[in-house]
Image (cartoon, coloured by chain):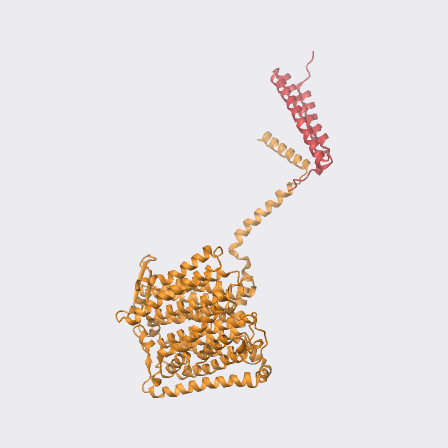
Chain colours: A orange, B red
Amino acid sequence: MRDLLWLIPILPFAGSFILIVAGTRLPKKLVPLIGSGSVGLSALITIFIGIDFITSTNDQIIQQVLWNWIDVAGFSPDFGLYLDSLSLTFVFVITFVGFLIHVYSAEFMVDDEGYARFFAYLNLFVGSMLLLVLGDNLVLLYFGWEGVGLCSFLLIGFWYQEEKNGYAARKAFIITRVGDTAMAIGLFMIFKALGTVNIMDIQGQAPVVWTVGSQQVTIIALLLLGGAVGKSAQLPLQNWLPDAMAGPSPVSALIHAATMVTAGVYLITRTHAIFELAPTAQFVVGAIGAITLLLAGFSALTQYDLKRVLAYSTISQIGYMFLALGVGAWSAAILHFMIHAFFKALLFLAAGAVIMALHHEHDMFKMGGLRKKLPVIYWTFLIGAASLAALPLITAGFYSKDQILWLTWAGEKGNIWFFLSALIGAFITTVYTFRMIFLTFFGEEKTHVSHVPGSRINIPLIVLAILSTFAGFIEIPHSLGHIQLFTHFLDPILPETILKPEIESTEWMIQLLAAALSIGGVFVAYYFYVMKPALHVQIKSTIPQVHNFLLNGWRFDSLYNWLFVRPFVYLSNINKNDFIDWPYHALVNVAIFFNRIFSFTQSGILRWYLIGIVIGAITILTLGLWM
Amino acid sequence: MSVIPAEYGLVLATTLFVLGLISLLIRRNIIFMLISVEIMLNAAGLAFIVASARWEQPDGQVMFLFILTMAAAEVSVGLALILQIYHQIKTLNSDEASKMKG
């Protein structure tokens, strides 16, 4: 079974290839079959390999070198795949959640004329993402990294006839490109310093070559962090993600919630050897996470658009993952990634179904009372939301988020500020999550339900709802039963988090605090949006500036517009007549000048031509006589 | 019999040629322009005859016969063209035939 590893990324690529070449000519029934079938097969192989991994006790690593990719003067990255428990976790989420989203899309996109194109892009995305997490060297990782960036661009702008979608797609592409450039420079520096791009060699050599906190390794770590920040929509490159919601809902679920945006988390975890050598950079990771999760949480409180709430919540939850990475809680970050992938994909898919049922109505304030009309969606959405809000004991989100909270408090690299921001973030998360629930599903019906989703939408929702509830039980904290399946699974690869001495006894207090806050958040949301619905309108009208400020995502767009876009446009306006172009323009102008003269002589009047001939003849004769 | 000096003949030919040229330049009517060309051709022919008489060689007269033949052909082609122009632009004014203006 392990030899089939190469099939996992190849199958989606093959599916994409078939759909690109023959997509429009295939019968419409066959298109989703190829699209989801290829990913489904990959998921099946992944599950078999995963079972093999868990049951067998010997080496937990699969390496497959397919061929030597480039070989130039010592720079020879292989086209090689590398699977350990970290990449297995990612591959499982990508293929399995990806498969469910493909099944969902088969019904969601059925009336779209770009049906085959959609599945072709989606398959291409899954293939690239698998290359990203399976690549055994940073160059192959970068290849996948850019591949998913391209697919993200294509899918955000999927409905390209509308101008704003194209704008959102370009915005996402350009902003992530800023981070990618930093990351590329980081890769160059790694190769220059270590002479290799193979991830395992880097892990081995980094502690030998660099001392802890040396300047070079800090710069490299910060550059890699730049790439991660761009892809994972963290401060200061976070403002592309809310606009990326212009894409179809399955795209938001797959790319902008479950997989691609967590590529930054993967990158940092993958190169954790480098980050452990650079404590400053690791602290920056945590600080970025802590600030981002608060900023995005506050913005999510004010949004009208259902999908934008989820987008800000994604930014905020990835902030939690970064926070966990920053305090060295590697496996907690990966656990939260996995659980987040389940419940956020679920929420996006359910939101997509709601939006479809209401004739593309995105505004939550125009929804309401959907509890009775769309029961399946209501219950699954509620389960996903409970998981996002980390309601204690019964949801998976509780176990993953609680672990992060605990480790920011108790971890050696944690501090009180990180902990406080995580705690406040948890409270805000609950409030905006249940604000969403109460506005959408409770109250009176404001928009008529026109379309009740069918089984291909319901089944993925139910499967994801089950996962969002039970996936947390693989990791139960110390004070509640102490199950650490996931941490042990990742143990051989990721270092354990070192706790502060003598702090273990406070764990139950932290848990109680987090639980109280999340339940309190539900009540706050209930009070504001069900009991006293006039109150939030009143608050909004007393402080409209603050409300608009948060609604527009802390006005980062205006800031960047003022800082970068306007000066750039100004400079390019000045340099419109680039001086390098001058000689070429001169050439053109000379040609145009003579063209004018000669076309003037072509007057069309015969007698002028005759005079020309006569003058010419006289000139030649005169010259002939003189010479 | 006294021989007319060659210079007289050449002056006559030149005068004819220049007259033809000037009328070619100032006339607008295409038929008159064709006639002017004929005059210039004949002036050239006259020059050949004078030269042939001066050098007492028959070549010049042979050349004149050639010019005569060529002039006949030229007139027939020229008249056909004039007819076509008249069909196209309904006038004989050469200035009107300025479609090729650059």
Quick one: A318 or A291, which is closer to the camera?
Answer: A318
- Furthest toward the left, the residue is A58
Measuring from the top left, give residue A444's x and y in whole percent.
58, 80
Instruction: Evaluate whether residue A284 shows in this view.
Output: no
Residue B31: image quadrant is top right
Name the residue: 55% across, 86% down.
A531
- Furthest toward the top, the residue is B1
- Does A296 appear above or below A28? below
Measuring from the top left, give residue A82's x and y in whole percent.
32, 65
Number of numbered discs overlaid on the protein picture = 0
Residue A363: image quadrant is bottom right
User: Image quadrant for the N terminus of chain A?
Assistant: bottom left
Measuring from the top left, give residue A148's x and y in whole percent.
43, 64
Name the side, left or right, on which A52 lies relative to A442.
left
Name the residue: 54% across, 49% down.
A587
Name the side, left or right, on which A215 lies relative to A230.
left
